[in-house]
């Protein structure tokens, strides 16, 4: 599978049994991911305003989520949480650092290196304190949460990563340093929530982003 920009399809099977559910494109693209693996698993729930669209996408696929995992508690990832729980009564997993303002409490709290089905949770704070990536080593992919976004979100070629914008992040320097935790794992695809995902060589491209020239030798002249 080659890297390409986002398609116009609201539901795209981007890998076998892995579905990109586009919830809105205007003014920005929001999405969730549905994995029909060991147990059908929904990762993130989009904004509250698009909860109905999320449920429609799930109904179209006719795959009932048995597990919901939130990568972090930003509004565009947690907004549809209550609607999904009301509709499907899945088992829910939420980062231990997350503060939720939802009607339903999570069934489980997870932290760094917790195993959630086929996923290993990797804490990558910086964008937010509760941001996680989810590595599925047996499936050769990682769900980035908001650890990174697609480069074409900022007008660059698709198929590469960028950090989330500073205006939306707590601490970009911390976010970049903590990305090194993902270098412990192998993966070919990196799925993002904003911009186009990286479908090939994602780990190598992450390495190239992090191992920039003279890394470790720079010092503040002051």
Image (cartoon, rainbow, N blue to C red):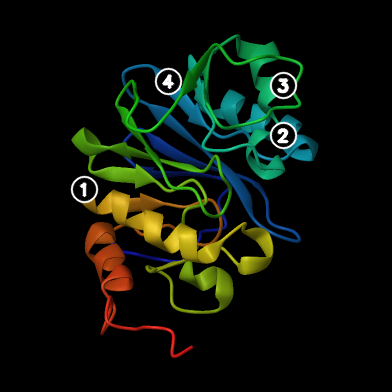
- Local packing at callout 1 (Cα closer than 10 Å; few below 14, some 14-19, many 20+) is few
Residue occupying the far right of the picture: 49
Name of the residue lying farthest toward the front? 222
Which of the numbered marks, if any, corresponds to residue 129? none
User: Which SS class for mark 1?
Assistant: helix
The correct choice, above or below, for 37 with respect to 127 in the image is above
- Find residue 83 and name its label: 3
Q: Mark 4, mark 1: which one is toward the viewer?
A: 1
Marks 1 & 3, CB-CB < 8 Å contact = no
Residue on which the image places disc 1: 184
Q: Are marks 4 and 2 in contact (CB under 8 Å)?
A: no
Query: In the image, which is nearer the foreground, mark 2 or mark 3?
Result: 2
Report if residue 63 is visible in the image.
no
Tag 4 residue: 40
Label 4 Cα neighbours within 10 Å, binned few <14 / some 14-19 / many ≥20: some
Dividing the picture into quarters, in which one does residue 74 lie? top right
Q: Residue 179: percent from the left, percent from the top?
A: 37, 56
The spot of residue 82 in percent (x, y) is: 71, 20
Viewer-nearest residue: 54 or 81: 81
Q: Earlier in the sequence, mark 1 or mark 3?
A: 3
Mark 4 or mark 3: which comes first in sequence? 4
- Residue situated in front as seen by the camera: 188 or 164: 164
Relative height, residue 69 to residue 163 (above, below): above
Q: Position of residue 75 (x, y in %)?
A: 71, 41
Horizontally, is 97 left or right of 17 in the view?
right
Q: Position of residue 136 (x, y in %)?
A: 28, 36
User: What is the quadrant of residue 219 in the picture?
Assistant: bottom left
Mark 2 sits on what residue?
79
Q: CA distance from mark 2 to mark 3?
A: 9 Å
Choose top left, top right, bottom left or bottom right for residue 215: bottom left
């Amino acid at each position: 599978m080659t890297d390409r920009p986002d398609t116009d399809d609201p539901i795209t099977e981007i890998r076998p049994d892995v579905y990109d559910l586009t919830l809105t494109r205007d003014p920005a693209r929001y999405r969730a991911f549905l994995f029909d693996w060991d147990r059908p698993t929904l990762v993130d729930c989009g904004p509250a305003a698009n909860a109905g669209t999320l449920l429609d996408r799930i109904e179209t696929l006719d795959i009932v989520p048995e597990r919901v995992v939130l990568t972090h508690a930003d509004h565009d990832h947690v907004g549809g949480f209550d609607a999904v729980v009301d509709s499907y009564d899945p088992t829910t997993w939420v980062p231990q650092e997350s503060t939720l303002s939802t009607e339903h409490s999570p069934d489980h709290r997870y932290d760094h290196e917790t195993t959630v089905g086929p996923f290993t949770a990797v804490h990558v704070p910086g964008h937010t304190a509760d941001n996680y990536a989810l590595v599925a080593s047996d499936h050769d992919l990682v769900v980035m949460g908001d650890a990174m976004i697609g480069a074409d979100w900022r007008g660059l070629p698709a198929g590469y990563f960028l950090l989330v914008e500073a205006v939306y992040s707590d601490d970009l320097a911390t976010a970049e340093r903590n990305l090194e935790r993902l270098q412990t794992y192998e993966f070919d695809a990196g799925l993002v929530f904003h911009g186009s995902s990286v479908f090939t060589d994602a780990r190598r491209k992450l390495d190239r982003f992090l191992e920039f020239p003279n890394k470790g030798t720079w010092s503040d002249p002051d």
